[in-house]
Structure formats: C-alpha cells, structure tokens
Amino acid sequence: MFRTFGISASRRSGALAAPALLLALALGAAACGGDDTSSDGAAPGDGGPAATASASAAGKVTVSPAAGKSVAPGTPVTVTAAGDTLGTVTVTPKGKASDGVDPVEVTGKLAADGHTWTSDRTMTPGTAYTVTVTATDAAGKQATTTSDFRTTAAGKVNGVTATPLNNAVVGVGLPLSLAFDKPVADKAAVERALSITTTPAVKGSWGWLTDPLTGIQRVDWRPDTYWPTGTKVTLTARLSGIDTGDGRFLRRDIHDTFSVGTARISYADLAKHTMRVTENGRTVKNFKISGGSSAFPTWNGTMVVMAKQSTVRMTSASVNIATSEDSADFYDEDVHNAVRITTSGTFVHAAPWNDRYMGKQNKSHGCIGLSDADAKWFFDSAVRGDVVVSTGSTRAVVDKGNGYGEWNLSADQWHALSALA
C-alpha cells in the first residue's frame, strides 16, 4: 500500500514518537507578567537613574544598554570599566518574559585587559534584565554596580521542533533535526547558535532541507557515516532571541541528549523481491517481499524509520491514485504493523492480500509489503532511526528532504548544505 501524510490511524503504537517534520511542539505558555521594576524602584523607560553603585566604582563602570532602555533581543550587552578591573558580570532575567516563556540568562566574555565585558548571545524577547557588575580599583577596593533594561517583545514568533528528545535511544541513521514553523531567512544566525557534542567524537555537519511534500524547513546534523552504536549526543541550541528573518523571533533555548542503539539496517532488493535485515553487521532475518508495481514503484535509495503505527488507514484517494470504487486501483484498507520510512507515505507493512506474490512480483502501490508474521517481527524490532536501503526499483532515488533522505548525499554534498559552509 502507498499513502501520504495526513491519513488517519485507527490505533497507534506508543513505541515511537512522531518525527519532527510531522509534529509541532507546544511552545507557548500562559502569559505571566515579568517584573519591570529597576533596582531603585523605577520601571525601565520611566527615566530612572542609569545605575546604582557603591564605593569608588560609581561613575567608573558603564553598562550598555543604559538603564531604562528597551532594546531588540539581539542587542549586545557591554560593560566597560574606566581604570578599574572588572570582576564578575551577570545579566539575569527578572521573572518570566511577557509571553510567559522562561527567559535565558545572558553569557559573555571578559577581554584580556579586564576592562571590557561583552555578551556572546541573544536575549529572550519581552524580558526585564538586571546587569550586576563587580569591579576593583587600583587601591584594591571592590564595588558593585547594577543596571536594569528590557528587551522588546516579539511581534512575530517562529516555533521549532527538535528530534529526538528526552534521552531517546535511536537507530544509527536518525539525524539530529530541528524543524521550523516558518521558513528561516537568516540560516547562518540560527546555525551559529547550535552546538553538538558527541561521545565518542563523531564528524558531521549541519545541513538545511525542505520537505517536498509538507514544505517544512529544517536543519539537521548528520554524521558523515552512520552513528556508531553507543554514541551519546548532546544538543545545545541557544536560540532564544534570534531573529529568523523579517522580525520573526525564536523564543526558547533547547538542551537535550540522546543515544544510539543497535545498528539495524535492512536491504530491500525490489528486483529479487527480498529484504535482508542486519543487526550490528550480522544478518538476522531474510524476508520475501512484494514492493511497488511498475505503475507505482517503490523509491530507490536510503530511507530511515520515522515512526510506526499498529494500524493505519490507507486510501487510494489520499494519494490521488483512484477515488472511485470502480477503479482497479481503488483501495481503502486498515493496514497493520506499519513502519513509516518517508513523509510521502512509504511504509514497510503487513500485506496479506499479496501473500501469493511475496518473493515473486511487486504488486503494491509503493510500499514494501510483508506477510503478517514477518511484518510483526519487523514492527516489533524497529526503532526510529533504523535504516532501510532500497535497490532494484525503476523509481528515482528518494528526495533528500522526503523523510530523512539526506543519506542519499555524500558527506561532501551534505556539508555543502550548511549555511556556514
């Protein structure tokens, strides 16, 4: 069977979470007003004093943005000390952002001479911040300076969905993926805010893709070759306050980890009507299959398990094959043990109606069909990120953005899709 995104499921498996490009995270939160009061009781913008200070630091430390100012989230924070030496500098949010989001604390770096501190990231929109500075004069006397300012609220926002999340254990082919609600114009700004660490060290790159079916844009981090089994991956995405283009802001940072499990790679030969399943390089199963017919061939190329559902309703109308029951290609079926490998609707699933063709002919509408018993084994074993390599079909190689089709690119081709290449 062959179906596209949007077909309903009557029963769903809880074994796998849906992929990023098919999901939307609930990024909003209940509105909660932040504390707009500066250190002296005046609200930013009310013309309060620029800072409060103690001892000899008064007049020697300058903070920008000045107290009471309302600035864009991407505005750098700088602290300078005339003659004194800076000690600690903190830029701390006061309460929640105006839209209820938990704002980020702003980090920065101290210059080698000890007289200038500059922030190294963007700030959360709609947030009141307090800058607290300690400085020491030539006589060794320390003083503290504080100053308050506020970031402007985001008139437009962009949501982002990360995959995988929550310490998931995934297959060797699943990239780290961030999908955006709206297209990103300033891809370089987003990519500069992303950091990935792996244990052991793994070479790879970020790359930008657009799903040809849904139009969803995403940036994925893909290793040059499949993940080594046992790899631990940590993502740090300092996205809060980044303008993705035309004043549309991201509001949250993302921090998450996942790990890589069994190297499960299946090889479907559409010409021989067989599929061989390997685990950590060892063949564990050989199946007879029936793939897509000559009229509706299965994709060639490398695909990745995105999700699985115990029952999926598949219809010919949903893929514009046939809408009339009079058509020989009409179907409307509840399909069991369905493992999705493309956004466009390619599954590995049970196809008992084609049992007589298993191992002999390709008779499906694009999916890879198995017997009931074989489909159950494959379904029970599959996890997000497992790899399915399809060869011997008359159809083209699957598009790089159709599911996780990026494995059909060489490492050099993939690196070229980075906005910082």
Image (cartoon, rainbow, N blue to C red):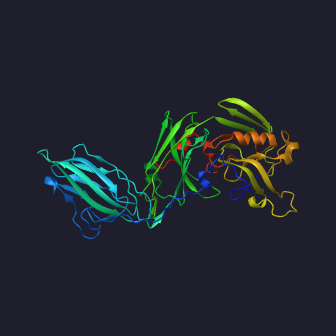
Total numbered labels placed on residues in the image = 0
- Tell me if residue 34 comes above or below residue 289 in the rendering: below
Where residue 393 sits, quadrant-wise, is top right
Q: Is residue 225 left or right of residue 273?
A: left
Q: Is residue 389 left or right of residue 209?
A: right
Determine if residue 307 is in view: yes
Q: Position of residue 84 (x, y in %)?
A: 16, 49
Q: Which residue is farthest bottom?
A: 46
Quarter where residue 269 is shown = top right
Residue found at the far left of this picture: 139
What residue sits 81% from the left and 47% below the top? 351
Residue at the extreme top of the image, as rendered:
282
- The picture places residue 70, in percent across and down from the top left corner, at 32, 65
Tell me: 418 left or right of 145: right
Q: Quadrant of residue 21?
A: bottom right
**Relative to 367, 18 lies left or right:** left
Q: Is residue 407 above or below residue 29?
A: above
- The residue positioned 79% from the left and 36% from the top of the image is 287
Pick the residue in front: 167 or 288.
Answer: 167
Instruction: Return the x and y of residue 51 as percentages of the image width and height.
Output: 22, 60
Between residue 187 and residue 38, name the one nearer to us.
Answer: 38
- Give 241 or 215, whichever is nearer the viewer: 241
Residue sitting at 27 percent across and 46 percent down?
110
Residue 296 visible to an observer of this rendering: no
